[in-house]
């Protein structure tokens, strides 16, 4: 069984409920794919993340030979070889075939330019604090209104991702991403968005040994 999650946006502050939930969840599966934005480069450094209480997850993730896909808040250039402390493979995208079922994973920022621009961590034109303020507003609205907010505001970014994935991916391959924070299971378009894993909400994907998936929405 594979577990896939994204957009935890870890900072120095450790949410014990989320930490314990993740420990149990990771322990229950065979392999793990982290689909980007594991830690949040808008607010902390890679050193901060490595030395934070979230490092309690590292031995578990390493045991499960975690595949770590870089996102736009935890870009490859933000980190160093210590990514090997919590993952066995690091990449920008990952392909998986289980029992004839093709899955293609990327964080989503490579296929969706609009949302990436307004949530960028590094910009030569806009000061970092502007993106920080924007992100705090997004966090507040998401926490207050949950799926209603992401459906109203972020759904259009998923539409862009669907169109881009159709153009670039092999036919019938299921595209799995995060990035927009709007969770969605669109079987007809071979599209899954993992949403976020924060604010007391646990969105994640399970793929069994037959290649069949379940998109879970839980609370911790």
Image (tube, rainbow, N blue to C red):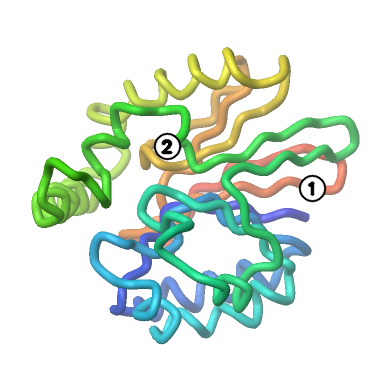
Q: Which disc is residue 109 wearing?
A: 2
Q: Residue at x 26, y 35 (%)?
A: 117
Position of 24 compared to 77: left or right?
right
Residue 99, x across and y down, in percent:
90, 36
Position of 13 compared to 172: left or right?
left
Q: Residue at x 10, y 56 (%)?
A: 129
Q: Nearer the viewer, residue 147 or 182?
A: 182
| Mark 2 Cα-neighbour bin, 10 Å: few <14, some 14–19, many ≥20 | many
Q: Which disc is residue 208 wearing?
A: 1
Q: Which disc is residue 180 wearing?
A: none
Q: Residue at x 48, y 57 (%)?
A: 76
Residue 87, x across and y down, in percent:
64, 68
Q: Nearer the viewer, residue 146 or 62?
A: 62
On screen, residue 19 above or below 184: below
Quarter of the rendering containing residue 181:
top left
- N-terminal label among 1 and 2: 2
Residue 4, x across and y down, in percent:
61, 52
Extreme-right residue of the structure: 99
Extreme-front residue of the structure: 124
Q: Nearer the viewer, residue 157 or 23?
A: 157
Position of 3 compared to 77: left or right?
right
Quarter of the rendering containing residue 3:
bottom right
On screen, residue 25 above or below 158: below
């Amino acid at each position: 069984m594979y577990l896939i999650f994204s957009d935890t946006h870890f900072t120095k502050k450790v949410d014990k409920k989320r930490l314990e939930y993740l420990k149990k969840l990771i322990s229950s599966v065979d392999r793990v794919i982290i689909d980007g934005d594991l830690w949040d480069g808008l607010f902390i450094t890679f050193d901060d993340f490595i030395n934070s209480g979230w490092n309690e997850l590292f031995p578990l993730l390493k045991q499960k030979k975690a595949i770590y896909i870089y996102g736009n808040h935890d870009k490859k250039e933000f980190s160093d070889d210590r990514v090997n402390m919590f993952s066995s493979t690091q990449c920008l995208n990952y392909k998986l075939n289980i029992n004839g079922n093709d899955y293609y994973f990327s964080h989503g920022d490579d296929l969706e330019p609009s949302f990436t621009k307004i949530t960028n961590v590094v910009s030569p034109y806009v000061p970092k604090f502007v993106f920080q303020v924007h992100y705090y507003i997004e966090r507040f609205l998401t926490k207050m209104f949950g799926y209603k907010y992401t459906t109203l505001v972020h759904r259009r970014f998923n539409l862009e991702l669907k169109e881009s994935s159709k153009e670039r991916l092999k036919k019938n391959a299921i595209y799995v991403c995060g990035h927009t924070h709007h969770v969605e299971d669109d079987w007809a378009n071979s599209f899954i968005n993992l949403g976020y894993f924060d604010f007391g909400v646990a969105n994640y994907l399970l793929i069994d040994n037959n290649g069949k998936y379940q998109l879970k929405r839980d609370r911790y």
